[in-house]
């Protein structure tokens, strides 16, 4: 099992004039601490317009800053909104991060989970999947060829150009796709991409999709992969907290999970999820469980290190390769995040070392 850290830079109200800048600075400190603790990956989402819920509108800037503060941890776009950017600019940003990080970039691609966000940027969310597919195909071609030969599809007509800089990882950084619904797992497998899911579904509910992913990626024709190699990797991200006191860790993790999945008064909360049945269905699924049931079902990862190890084992048993902790969520404080990172590094990660 590998371990990652994820952030959306959440900022529940109330705020003051320094809250936002402090959240960014805290995020940088958290990733540096995660590298020191033995975490292998850091992922940051791309969010637009979602005050309180996600202030990371320029993930490439955060990742570039981290590339100069870290040496080993992999730095991942989790994910770039492919329908919302020119493919040339996507290739340039990913390659620049790969250069600055000395070959540590991970390239996650997605279409966006909210029409409010995608539509606000001037794009039609109803055709997001097909636009995103064309964009990704074009970007991979840009990485493959010193002189990009051009690309003509339904949505893009791109001329031949030299696309610089060139990524250090050849032919390109590992490719990933976000899976906000179960159908995406098999789709990702057929494309040869790694998949990042979410623990708002239990391990038992997720297991068939992991199996479908494995079967698809192993039986697919490699010539039909989006990338030039298969990235057979499965990950899930989980709202989490680790504390020496088991009850404290459980309650902080579950409070953050409830906030993240819809039990909050953020003004844009109702617009967040267009998949998975919408925010009300997702929130009801979480609300229908007690804190201890959320922990027992491994939907929120919380407690002391021993409890968290038992939860990680449940995800490992169904074939998940990477458990991604989202520690900075809801009203969890920076000090609580840093304590979680330290304890996970000392007492959880070593238990799963190969």
Image (cartoon, grey):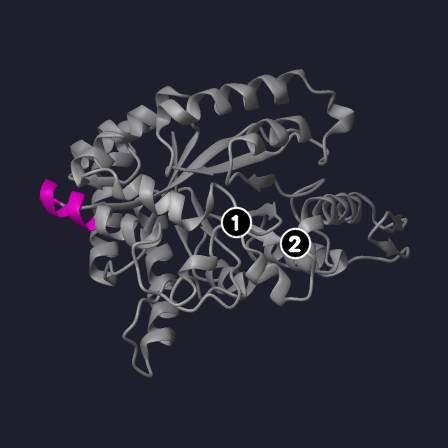
Quadrant where the C terminus lies? top left
Residue 306 seen in render: yes
Bin the neighbour count of mark 2 within 10 Å (Cα to Cα): few under 14, some 14-19, many 20 and up: many
The residue at the point 66 percent across, 16 percent down is: 219
Residues at marks 1 and 2, CA–CA distance in whole angstroms: 10 Å
Q: Is residue 263 magenta?
A: no
The residue shown at (74%, 60%) is 86
Q: Residues within 10 Å of mark 1 (few under 14, many from 20)?
A: some
Quadrant where the N terminus is found in the figure: top left
Examine the structure image and report whether residue 250 is included in the region drawn in magenta: yes
- The residue to which callout 2 is attached is 125
Instruction: In the displayed orientation, state which residue is furthest to the bottom.
Output: 17
> In the image, 292: left or right of 109?
left
Image vertical order of residue 96 relative to residue 242, above or below: below
Label annotation for residue 274: 1
Identify the main secondary structure in magenta. helix
* Residue closest to the eye, 183 or 306: 183
Residue 118 falls in image quadrant:
bottom right
Q: Residue at x 75, y 47 (%)?
A: 143
Spot occupied by residue 40 in the image (x, y as percentages of width and height): 42, 42
Is mark 1 in CB contact (under 8 Å) with mark 2? yes
Q: Is residue 249 above or below residue 207?
A: below
User: Is 165 above or below relative to 320?
Assistant: below
Find numbered disc 2 in the image and state the secondary structure of the residue it sits on.
helix
- Span shown in magenta: 244-252
* Residue 298 place in picture, x, y as percent: 28, 32
């Amino acid at each position: 099992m590998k371990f990652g850290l994820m952030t959306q830079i959440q900022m529940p109200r109330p705020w003051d004039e320094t809250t936002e800048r402090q959240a960014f600075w805290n995020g940088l400190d958290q990733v540096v601490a995660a590298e020191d603790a033995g975490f292998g990956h850091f992922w940051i989402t791309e969010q637009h317009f979602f005050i309180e819920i996600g202030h990371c509108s320029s993930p490439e800037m955060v990742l570039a800053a981290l590339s100069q503060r870290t040496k080993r941890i992999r730095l991942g776009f989790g994910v770039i909104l492919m329908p919302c950017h020119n493919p040339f600019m996507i290739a340039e940003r990913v390659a620049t991060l790969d250069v600055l990080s000395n070959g540590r970039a991970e390239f996650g691609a997605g279409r966006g989970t909210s029409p409010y966000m995608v539509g606000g940027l001037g794009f039609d969310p109803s055709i997001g999947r097909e636009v995103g597919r064309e964009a990704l195909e074009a970007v991979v071609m840009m990485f493959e060829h010193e002189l990009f030969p051009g690309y003509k599809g339904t949505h893009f007509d791109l001329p031949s150009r030299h696309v610089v800089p060139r990524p250090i990882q050849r032919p390109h950084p590992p490719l990933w796709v976000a899976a906000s619904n179960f159908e995406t797992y098999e789709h990702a497998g057929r494309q040869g991409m790694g998949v990042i899911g979410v623990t708002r579904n239990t391990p038992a509910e997720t297991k068939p999709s992991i199996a479908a992913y494995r079967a698809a990626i192993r039986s697919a024709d490699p010539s039909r992969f989006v990338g030039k190699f298969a990235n057979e990797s499965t990950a899930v991200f989980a709202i989490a907290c680790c504390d020496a006191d088991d009850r404290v860790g459980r309650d902080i993790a579950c409070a953050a999970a409830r906030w993240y999945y819809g039990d909050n008064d953020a003004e844009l909360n109702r617009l967040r999820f267009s998949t998975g049945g919408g925010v009300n269905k997702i929130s009801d699924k979480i609300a229908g469980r007690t804190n201890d049931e959320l922990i027992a079902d491994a939907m929120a990862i919380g407690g002391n290190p021993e409890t968290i190890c038992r939860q990680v084992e449940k995800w490992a048993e169904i074939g998940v390769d990477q458990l991604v902790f989202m520690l900075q969520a809801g009203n969890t404080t920076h000090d609580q995040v840093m304590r979680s990172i330290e304890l996970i590094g000392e007492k959880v990660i070593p238990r799963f070392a190969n």
